[in-house]
Amino acid sequence: MHAVVVHAAKDLRVEEREPPPLGPHEVRVRLGAGGICGSDLHYYHEGGIGDFPIREPLVLGHEMAGTVVELGPAVEGLAPGTKVAVNPTWPCPGVRFDLGARAHLDPQIRFAGSSRTFPHVQGFFQELVTVRAEQCRPVPAALPVEEAAMAEPLACCLHAIRRAREVLGRHVLVLGCGPIGCLTIAAARLAGAGRITACDLVPATLAKAKAMGADEVIDLSADRAPLDRLKKGGGTVDVVVEAAGSPKAAVDGLEATRRGGTYVQFGVLPRGMHPIPFDQIVAKELDMIGTFRFWEEFDWAVEAIAARRLDVRPLLTEVLPLSRAKEAFELASDRRRAMKVQLVPG
Amino acid sequence: MHAVVVHAAKDLRVEEREPPPLGPHEVRVRLGAGGICGSDLHYYHEGGIGDFPIREPLVLGHEMAGTVVELGPAVEGLAPGTKVAVNPTWPCPGVRFDLGARAHLDPQIRFAGSSRTFPHVQGFFQELVTVRAEQCRPVPAALPVEEAAMAEPLACCLHAIRRAREVLGRHVLVLGCGPIGCLTIAAARLAGAGRITACDLVPATLAKAKAMGADEVIDLSADRAPLDRLKKGGGTVDVVVEAAGSPKAAVDGLEATRRGGTYVQFGVLPRGMHPIPFDQIVAKELDMIGTFRFWEEFDWAVEAIAARRLDVRPLLTEVLPLSRAKEAFELASDRRRAMKVQLVPG
Amino acid sequence: MHAVVVHAAKDLRVEEREPPPLGPHEVRVRLGAGGICGSDLHYYHEGGIGDFPIREPLVLGHEMAGTVVELGPAVEGLAPGTKVAVNPTWPCPGVRFDLGARAHLDPQIRFAGSSRTFPHVQGFFQELVTVRAEQCRPVPAALPVEEAAMAEPLACCLHAIRRAREVLGRHVLVLGCGPIGCLTIAAARLAGAGRITACDLVPATLAKAKAMGADEVIDLSADRAPLDRLKKGGGTVDVVVEAAGSPKAAVDGLEATRRGGTYVQFGVLPRGMHPIPFDQIVAKELDMIGTFRFWEEFDWAVEAIAARRLDVRPLLTEVLPLSRAKEAFELASDRRRAMKVQLVPG
Amino acid sequence: MHAVVVHAAKDLRVEEREPPPLGPHEVRVRLGAGGICGSDLHYYHEGGIGDFPIREPLVLGHEMAGTVVELGPAVEGLAPGTKVAVNPTWPCPGVRFDLGARAHLDPQIRFAGSSRTFPHVQGFFQELVTVRAEQCRPVPAALPVEEAAMAEPLACCLHAIRRAREVLGRHVLVLGCGPIGCLTIAAARLAGAGRITACDLVPATLAKAKAMGADEVIDLSADRAPLDRLKKGGGTVDVVVEAAGSPKAAVDGLEATRRGGTYVQFGVLPRGMHPIPFDQIVAKELDMIGTFRFWEEFDWAVEAIAARRLDVRPLLTEVLPLSRAKEAFELASDRRRAMKVQLVPG
């Protein structure tokens, strides 16, 4: 079967692989659609992510939905033919999702398509994916797999919004309107935000931001004045989410946050140190909050998408077969041409 | 002008009153619509509420929207003809709403149409209402006043949902589907709840609950089994809101809350003590949370209604003129005949 | 070896038992001292606790410290001769204590000397206890085992105080000055409480409350007026902890809690329902919080006792050999004669 | 009377001033002792603080205790001769401290000896201070004024610790052992911290850190290895408080904070931007928390000092008369020679 494997920076290959043997508690899921994420692009362009270079060939991909085709002998409660969204992470035996843990912060937690642990956990960009049964969340048969595959990035965004603690009724500013920024807008709307403002330097993204629920958008390539107005009097915004991964956006965001407000750092900045205005944090008594992946929010995301409580379709802009993975990665790297690019079999 | 005045239990009169002189920071608002709330019914039926009997004739009403008709000389930023929702409470001079205070818990806080302070603050069921300019929140001219008048009860419900702390993605059970229960459903939906279940003994209310966003409803007059299933294994619901004001519902709710979950007591129970299963609170380590009125949530409610982020129209079932106030109060007291009853001029 | 086994209500026997085989990850700990807890007394007097009658003979005891005498072959980091406090509960494999979980709420969690799971987990009142190595927390060799054995009840109290969320600087009222009430006073003091007030009906306990850190004590057998003063104006106390397990104390506590304050239900009330004033919860917008056992707080308790950041010695009033267990249980049941009764070998 | 007035950077004068007329709700307090704070030093060395240069001559000082000598005619509940700690800030009329507000974040809040509002609020370094009666908190007559004058900086530290949210039982690292760092250590101890580690570059401060409750100290001028060990595996410390105002300490602190931990920025860094490792915040999902002044914590500080629940005496190293203010300011600027320098009359 086809698998999309990164060997080194810019060395992305479509290879033939055999699926591993099926364990008693595992299932095989045929790929329906698999989304390319910003972290996949880091592997592609840099051969690793942050402090974690790849140490062996790695099948990429951790956003995926498909159809169950084979069950290990001990699997209960799943039938072949079931359409599922697949969670790229899973609890240690015995950790129940509903007990408030933050097990996603465990450095030993396993996550598909990631080089953070070794041996690496192979990812989802392959025609048949072998996963633990508990990673599979059934979705309605009528739900397109492309939508179901958005559960993973949406889970990250729901987690980011949850980390902001108080969003209901608040003015939320989202900096950066790529797929993550746009899903954060949708997640903030879902969570009852009041006014939502969104900024980006690429005008095409702003239409998507509006489609996902932003009340007003600021085209920073044309005019920074509306953003500067949000900084008046020491900042006016209740909750700022930096989803651009840009040092400049981070400074903008800290300056726009009101006294006593919350700034969430969601975007991954270029490696190294970047300057911030510390006085903003101290004199305004900010909460500057990091957010990383998700935990129980995966189930929330599946449920919200399945019930169309939010509509991810405006973000689904491109679909390519696995065999054209390199082209798909290049396309996903160009914010002017594509929003979410997904891979499908073939 | 007409005013609806309670003198004692069951002694509700429509009287002619002169508006008080207009202070420099005050405005006069012509009544557009004023909703009858459960606490108004307590005054009507019992001549007081809880430990606060009326001590002088009291104009009832604290849910109201209308049109500004006259401005005190020091008022800025409001023009005659502006349609406004009117907040029945207001901050002490200098208390800013955005500083996280819970000033609504101050026993000296003033609240329209309430006997909790003395002299009582006269309420909104009169043709011309004289209030501080800062109590007025402009709404779009196109928004029907009946919808705008729902800002106050919605503010209470947003506060209740906020008091629940974690609603995003959670299973919420609302016990009682009167106007407050139904608005709580809408508020939970707005705040990103996962599944919402609603119960009532009056089947007619359940259709409204569904219209306001409940995913499933339980008709307790027909079959308690679905509720009992929610209590399995020590309880399964993440967040329970008791909005019925019923001792039995409170016990049901505590039993249905899962380990580590949250139970919100929103309904006002009959005076006196009522039994609860303490072991549910201890062994399941519950948070049993009281909720009382609102503070900054009034602005959130106005904004949500003005933007139709939630739709209160299914609840607006009856409109009567002030002159038929007594009939309106009787109607509002009958859950089988009416949901939200509002008074209008005439 | 001697073991203290409950067979039914009032049927407590000292039996000879053989230690079970030692698993590879287990250790054997020789009993130093084991404290009798209120829940042990429930088993003794009622043959069970709450909804969990004993279904097989059960060695009681879950508060214990002693000396490691034998190690399973896979145990690392512990040496024979080490003095340890023993945690009666332990995480599922892979659940790390520092990840914020509330795994103690899992109905399947195992806990020594408890009938909540079946087969029951045998307890610590035996000369040699066989436990998992990770249950053992080394303490300084110079620390008396009697003090180390207080880690478990202190962990419960630290958890209760943590559940109260905001204790620093606050006025705390503790209702009930048995061992748990007194340790709660010490835990509140440790956590930076402002004024601490304590009440009991048994005057002898109040001296202990003072020794553990109460600033003022109220002898309810003599004069309820000081408690009534705390209820003035709707209640004045920031944080109330009910540690008496008394329906009357619960009502007192709810009435004494100030608007916006926190009431913690720590005591286990007699089975059945008990009445509360719901209006106190609603109109004062209280947080009524349940607390159950502990999780990571066991380590905090060991550290605090080992460093003598709090001094548990005033509570250590009686020590008896295992062979006199029945007498010890009777003594522990009489609040006028004993505070904490501990069992030692012999 | 003598007053210590800053006119510009390095232009500090001891002048003769007349006390202002006494308002009906005001009292006059004779200076007992007034501590020199880091922000006083900013005014002295830079002629302002942060973005707030002085715009008119400013009497410095906001840490003060003394004796009431004269009462305005409307003052109740205070008598001449009462020893008091004086709060440099005060609520707007009607804002009650116990309602959870964060009114200290209001840009219009008034604060003694500060240029943040204009006209500036004159400070406490004068022989007679005229303040509102509600700013005065009586302390026991036997308490030395020097200790009472520490209530203000302690209030800041209690607020910082409260902002950290979870300190009970936690490992706390305090970076910087000046007066604020040392009081933060004491505040963390008061709040029930587990292990407390403290670092500084000036060895003399570390003895004070130990005296105030640190369990272990790291002399960074001699050996950074112990600090590096705290950074192992991505960081090990639950709660880090940066109290040095140093960009390097901030980076150290972020690196030492464990996954899911809390970093509190308390120190005021040099003006401008300073680089931080964003990946620490994101991948470890940190809470980076600002803290600014205090609100209700002033009362807690007075109570804790009055009851000697913590002992501030090790920090009281130098006392000079007002007439030698300039010498006192130079002394306070030299971390090698002085910890807390206080001014007294004369």
Image: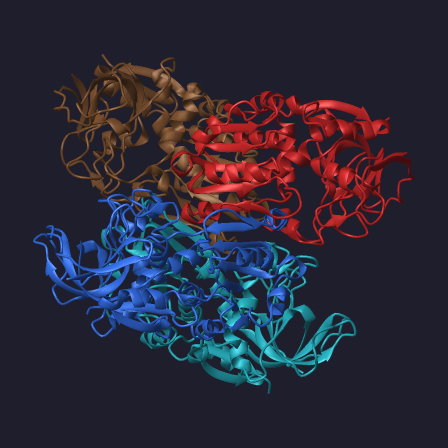
Chain colours: A red, B brown, C cyan, D blue
Percent x, y of residue A76:
77, 42
Percent x, y of residue B272:
30, 46
Task: Give B90 or B93, whichever is nearer the viewer.
Answer: B93
Side (left or right) of D345 relative to A207: left
User: Residue at the bottom extreme?
Assistant: C346
Task: Give C294 or A60, whichever is nearer the viewer.
Answer: A60
Percent x, y of residue A42:
73, 39
Q: Quadrant of the N terminus of chain C?
A: bottom right
Looking at the image, can residue B221 be seen?
A: no
Residue at position x 27%, y 34% in the image? B90
Residue at position x 53%, y 83% in the image? C144
Looking at the image, can residue D248 be seen?
A: yes
Side (left or right) of B300 relative to A186: left
Res A112 → quadrant: top right
Q: Quadrant of the C terminus of chain C?
A: bottom right
How many numbered marks, from 0 up? 0
Side (left or right) of C138 relative to D18: right
Percent x, y of residue C188:
41, 65
Res D30 → quadrant: bottom left
Up-down relation of residue A165 to residue D249 (above or below): above
Up-down relation of residue D235 to residue C332 (above or below): above
Task: Give D137 or C65, whichever is nearer the viewer.
Answer: D137
Side (left or right) of B128 relative to C252: left
